[in-house]
Image (tube, rainbow, N blue to C red):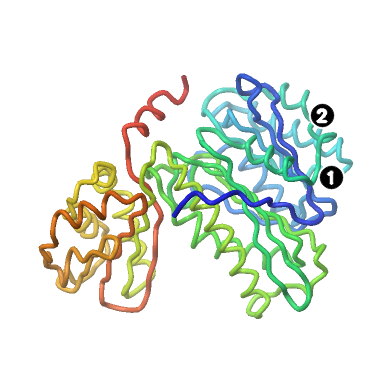
Amino acid sequence: MKLSKNRNPVVPGFKAVGLSCGIKDKNTKDLALIVSNVPATAAGVFTKNRIVSPGVTWSRNALSKSKFCRAIIVNSGNANTVVGPKGFEDCDAITKLVAEELSIPQKEVLIASTGVIGVPLPSHKILQATPKLIQSLGRSQKHWTDASEAIMTTDLVSKSDKVSFDLKGHRIVIGGMSKGSGMIHPNMATMLGFLWTNAVIDSKTLKLALIEATDRSFNRITVDGDSSTNDCVIVLANGEAKNPTIKPNTSGYGEFLKALTKICKNLASKIILDGEGATKFVTVCVQGGKTRKQAYLIANSVATSSLVKTALFGEDPNWGRIYCAVGNAGAPFNPEKVDILLNKNLLLKNGCPTNLSPKKLEKAMRQHEINITIDLHCGKEWEEVLTCDFSYDYVKINAEYTT
């Protein structure tokens, strides 16, 4: 898979902006705002880390009090995490000012942050920049590009996308952007994802669709096995498509879920392709599983194995590391039924090596995209996890992150 071109994520009824407020050096963009013209139904999923940013707590609470949202303000360069009471006070002050400037209720303003942990947020810089931020809102591709760039940290590229489909004569559009390239692991990661759509859908159904979509996308990617403190995926639906309300267990819901999952997978893939120091894009697929849980545990074990990831970087045809990771997954299976393929090259058949030509395997491992398929031959369930290799640059980037 190649890093696909960012599609303009403009959706009717939404505006965005991104600019520099001085959190980062050299006038680098570090503050973004997404605004719906009307109250939008909203849903979010958040990190499973027990240590969370006050921004996560604020947005969770806001969504529990109101199922509508008008604005999301996001800063990069500072996580606003582990900073004491000031962290929540900053969230309150920032969202209050955004609400006042937009003339909307404060409970309809969500907030997110990403960056270094343990450093007080220079909230005065955000507050000073907020009036200009709101005055600069717009719908052009440049506005959305600026916003997607403003949420980046160690990302090398911004990430945005758009999908659309027709529902009973109404054009449904879903736009989105994400950030992340390291500290990425299932159950959210050091990633932020924001989605917006013109669909008519109630908040409970929207939350159900978001959970299902993230389960097959953002929660199926891993770079380094670390889940962060700030992660969230938030979706807004402003209803401007005027379609019949999407309800669970209907064909309309199925089409919406398919489109939402597609854009989530596209954005998640962009994160893996931009993995810190990554040279390989790796898909680990486990098929023939008895249950989805069994398949996921095994796929995740292979995808998170440091020995597998370093072998992939070194293009070392040491397939024994893959099989070892399968056995370390903590999921029962019959070793005498397992097949393992790497880029369609059969390495293991019924638990026994095929004695594949080393030169053929070396050639396969030189490819940028690596597909590892593990067939358990014990059922019909499957799962896949996206990951990347571990390179020298990954160590350098993370060894020097705060400096």
Image quadrant holding the N terminus, namely bottom left
Residue at left 13%, top 59%? 357
Q: Nearer the viewer, mark 2 or mark 1?
A: 2
Q: Name the residue nearer the viewer: 303 or 119.
A: 303
Dot 2 surroundings within 10 Å: few (below 14), some, or many (20 or more)? few
Q: Amino acid at mark 1?
A: Pro
Label 2 belongs to which residue?
Answer: 132
Residue occupied by mark 1: 105
- Identity of the amino acid at label 2? Lys
Image coordinates for residue 155, horizontal then vertical, percent: 52, 37
Marker count (numbered): 2
Q: Which mark is residue 134?
A: none
Q: Position of residue 61 (x, y in %)?
A: 68, 47
Residue for point 64% across, 39% down: 112
Please report contact status of discs 2 and 1: CB closer than 8 Å, yes or no. no
Q: Secondary structure at mark 1?
A: loop
The first of marks 2 and 1 along the sequence is 1
Crowding around mark 1 (Cα neighbors within 10 Å: few <14, some 14 to 19, many 20+) is some
Q: Is residue 252 left or right of residue 71?
A: left
Tell me: 278 left or right of 11: left
